[in-house]
Image (cartoon, rainbow, N blue to C red):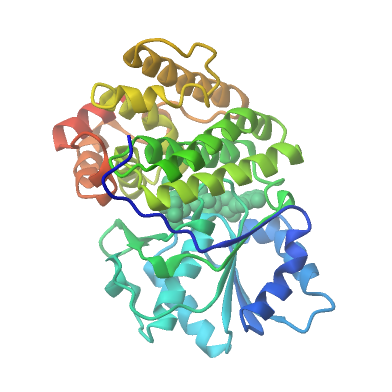
């Protein structure tokens, strides 16, 4: 069904393949930039990935001004404000984020603070609260999950309030996304599985949420198809370059899809599990996805049924409700396979959550904006019941 109204926007230039990295200095030239602030974390540095970026700058008149490698997992407003000060002090003129969602979102956050001439990120929280144009940003993802390289979103942890804050603005799209299979080869199996399930959740929630539209549907379906083909392969054999570039493209396509249509209740529960119990984002999504699909099933059986083919179903002509059940079984099968090959938890109780934590997670979930476009309402009771099932 075509919605009465929808809009689609993705202004990001995408470079994919092993040659993509060498084009970074040229892209900087096109963007009118000379001196880059590289934003990353210690794990990415230890994996040798910054060396690949440095090599791209050899024989170039563009330079890396500073390498900021202090991004923690689930970056915070404090780190963002610190990075913004350094960017000004070092006289950089663009950001190059090299890492997963945490590094990319830290760069996005600092870019807001610098470009708005502010000293605090918190003021810009929410939807379209950024007024000034941002400095150029190049995003080089090293996980295949968040899709932040092509989204208008940044998620940053608020240390004082103990919540994850969302920033949504068309200004937050990076200028260039660089997808290179070498950048994810070192990602450990469990991290590969978890971030890949984050990408699958983006694609499935984009395809099934209230703001779905035919353009996002295409991106979401191709992403799901790539994840079916490559996620178990990339998790089982990290050095499989075909699987790695397949997953990097899947995460990017899923990012384009959800950045326009939105996500849903899985993400609210995952954000809440992250802020209350520090469950990694992809792990929480992986565990909760099938339970939320079951909850949504009676409202949108056709939509859930519509992705069974991309997930590998050879049966295609059942009643929508039954076909939707096939989709849910295939998601569960994928989760079981990933658990076998990487130890990815399949229950919240295996991911550091205790039964006593569930009410606090349920409360945080209903206060999280991601479920606004979920096909069915998320109440405290529904959140708690879903968490208990996934426990
Ligand atoms: N902006 C968005 O659109 C968006 C969407 C979804 C999630 N997020 C946010 O992104 C964050 C999660 O990002 P993430 O899942 O990509 O993980 P991450 O950036 O937090 O990284 C996780 C860990 O993996 C390590 N790592 C990353 N790449 C590696 C590699 N190639 N080899 C070895 N180690 C590597 C890092 O050092 C880090 O320790 C969360 O804060 C989440 O809320 C943002
Ligand atoms: Fe996500």
Which of the 4 quarters of the picture holds residue 214?
top left
Residue 2 visible at all: yes
Name the quarter where the N terminus is drawn.
Answer: top left
State the residue in front, 173 or 43.
173
Q: Is residue 99 above or below residue 125?
A: above
**Residue 299 placement (x, y as % from top left):** 23, 26
Residue at the image point whose x is 30% and y is 68% from the top: 128
Out of 153 and 90, give the one closest to the viewer.
153
> Residue 121 location, x and y as percent?
35, 74
Looking at the image, residue 300 lies above or below residue 250: above
**Percent position of residue 150, x then y:** 51, 57
Front residue of 95/3: it is: 3
Relative placement, left or right, of 193 versus 262 is right
Question: What residue appears at the point 44 percent right and 44 percent down from the top-left corner?
Answer: 216
The foreground one among 94 and 256 is 256
Could you tell me which residue is drawn at 40 percent across and 15 percent down?
Answer: 323
Residue 338: percent from left, percent from top: 56, 26
Q: Name which quarter of the figure residue 109 lies in.
A: bottom left
Total residue callouts: 0
Residue 276 vertical placement versus 325 (above, below): below
Image quadrant holding the C terminus, namely top left
14 with respect to 130 (left or right): right
| Residue 281 appears in the rendering | no
Residue at image coords 35%, 47%:
262
From the viewer's perspective, is residue 137 above or below residue 292?
below
Name the side, left or right, on which 300 lies relative to 206: left
Q: Quadrant of residue 49?
A: bottom right
């Amino acid at each position: 069904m075509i919605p009465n109204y929808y809009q689609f926007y993705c202004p990001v230039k995408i470079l994919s393949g092993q040659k993509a990295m060498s084009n970074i200095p040229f892209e900087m030239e096109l963007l009118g930039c000379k001196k880059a602030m590289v934003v990353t974390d210690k794990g990415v540095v230890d994996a040798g990935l910054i060396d690949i970026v440095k090599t791209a700058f050899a024989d170039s008149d563009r330079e890396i001004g500073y390498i900021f490698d202090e991004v923690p997992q689930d970056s915070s407003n404090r780190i963002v404000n610190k990075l913004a000060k350094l960017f000004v002090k070092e006289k950089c003129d663009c950001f190059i984020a090299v890492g997963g969602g945490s590094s990319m979102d830290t760069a996005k956050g600092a870019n807001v603070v610098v470009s708005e001439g502010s000293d605090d990120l918190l003021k810009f929280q929410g939807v379209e609260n950024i007024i000034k144009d941002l400095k150029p940003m190049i995003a080089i993802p090293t996980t295949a999950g968040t899709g932040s390289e092509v989204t208008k979103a940044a998620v940053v942890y608020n240390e004082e309030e103990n919540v994850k804050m969302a920033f949504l603005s068309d200004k937050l799209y990076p200028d260039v996304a660089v997808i290179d299979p070498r950048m994810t080869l070192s990602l450990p199996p469990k991290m590969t599985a978890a971030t890949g399930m984050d990408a699958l959740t983006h694609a499935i929630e984009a395809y099934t949420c209230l703001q779905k539209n035919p353009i996002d549907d295409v991106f979401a379906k191709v992403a799901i198809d790539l994840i079916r083909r490559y996620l178990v392969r990339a998790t089982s054999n990290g050095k499989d370059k075909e699987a790695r570039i397949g997953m990097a493209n899947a995460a990017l396509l899923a990012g384009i899809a959800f950045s326009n249509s939105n996500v849903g209740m899985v993400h609210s529960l995952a954000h809440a599990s992250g802020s209350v119990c520090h469950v990694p984002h992809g792990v929480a999504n992986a565990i909760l996805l099938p339970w939320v699909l079951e909850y949504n099933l009676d409202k949108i059986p056709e939509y859930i049924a519509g992705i069974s083919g991309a997930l590998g179903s050879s049966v295609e002509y059942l009643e929508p409700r039954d076909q939707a059940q096939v989709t849910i079984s295939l998601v569960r099968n994928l989760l079981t396979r990933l658990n076998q090959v990487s130890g990815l938890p399949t229950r919240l109780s295996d991911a550091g959550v205790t039964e006593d934590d569930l009410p606090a997670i349920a409360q945080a979930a209903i206060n999280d904006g991601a479920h606004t476009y979920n096909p069915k309402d998320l109440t405290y009771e529904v959140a708690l019941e879903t968490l208990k099932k996934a426990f």
